Image (cartoon, rainbow, N blue to C red):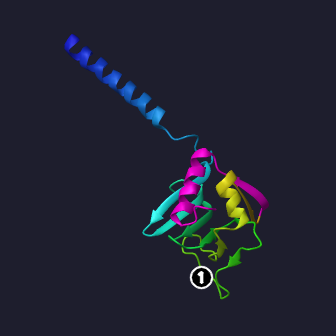
């Protein structure tokens, strides 16, 4: 009888440990929204500074540049609140294959006061369908913002 009981108890113990391990690895509450923040990535020579959910297509704003450029290309549902922001194209905008909507692309000088405020204070005032509001960057995110401007060749922002 002991030959059967000892392996059964050991197997039951492994099941309990596995269940507890699986419970601690579970994702946060299924209905909870993922946090948004600033993220920096590179695709070839292009640097991408985005505000959205990490490792997803859920972006509110993305700015791209290449080394030595004085302007960033801006995409997203919100854009920097600046009178110096201008649409990149005066012709019909192409359809965005991810969202199915119109691609909203604009350009802004990397020396624009709105972007200087982001680089210096970690705050960017933006506007979109919901009106004007501010995107903020914590200390780690501010380092990413600084790296973006340094990469673009505008470290004196």
Q: Is residue 156 magenta?
A: yes
Closer to us: 123 or 67: 67
**Residue 88, position in %: x, y?**
64, 80
- Quadrant into which the N terminus falls: top left
Q: Which residue is mark 1?
A: 94
* Quarter of the view holding residue 59: bottom right
Q: Nearer the viewer, residue 59 or 150?
A: 150
Question: Which residue: 54% across, 75% down?
Answer: 97
**How far across and how far down the image is residue 108, in percent?**
66, 72
* Residue 64 in the image: above or below residue 38: below
As rendered, which of 115 and 28 lies closer to the eye?
Answer: 115
Where is residue 117 drawn, in percent x and y? 71, 58
Residue 31 seen in the figure: no
Residue at 59%, 82% (x, y): give it.
94
Magenta region: 130-157
Furthest residue toward left? 3
Outermost residue, top direction? 2
Image coordinates of residue 129 in percent, x first then y, are: 76, 66
Instruction: Name the residue located 67 percent from the left edge and 54 percent from the top edge.
Output: 120
């Amino acid at each position: 009888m002991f030959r059967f009981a000892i392996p059964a108890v050991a197997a039951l113990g492994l099941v309990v440990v596995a269940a507890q391990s699986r419970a601690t690895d579970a994702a946060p509450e299924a209905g909870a929204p993922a946090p948004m923040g600033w993220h920096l990535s590179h695709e070839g020579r292009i640097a991408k500074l985005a505000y959205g959910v990490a490792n997803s297509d859920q972006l509110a704003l993305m700015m791209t540049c290449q080394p030595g450029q004085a302007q960033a290309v801006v995409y997203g549902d919100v854009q920097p609140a600046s009178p110096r922001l201008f649409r990149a194209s005066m012709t019909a905008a192409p359809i965005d294959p991810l969202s199915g909507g119109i691609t909203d692309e604009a350009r802004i000088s990397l020396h624009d006061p709105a972007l200087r405020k982001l680089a210096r204070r970690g705050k960017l005032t933006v506007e979109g369908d919901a009106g004007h509001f501010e995107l903020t960057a914590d200390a780690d995110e501010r380092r990413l913002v600084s790296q973006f401007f340094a990469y673009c060749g505008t470290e004196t922002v």
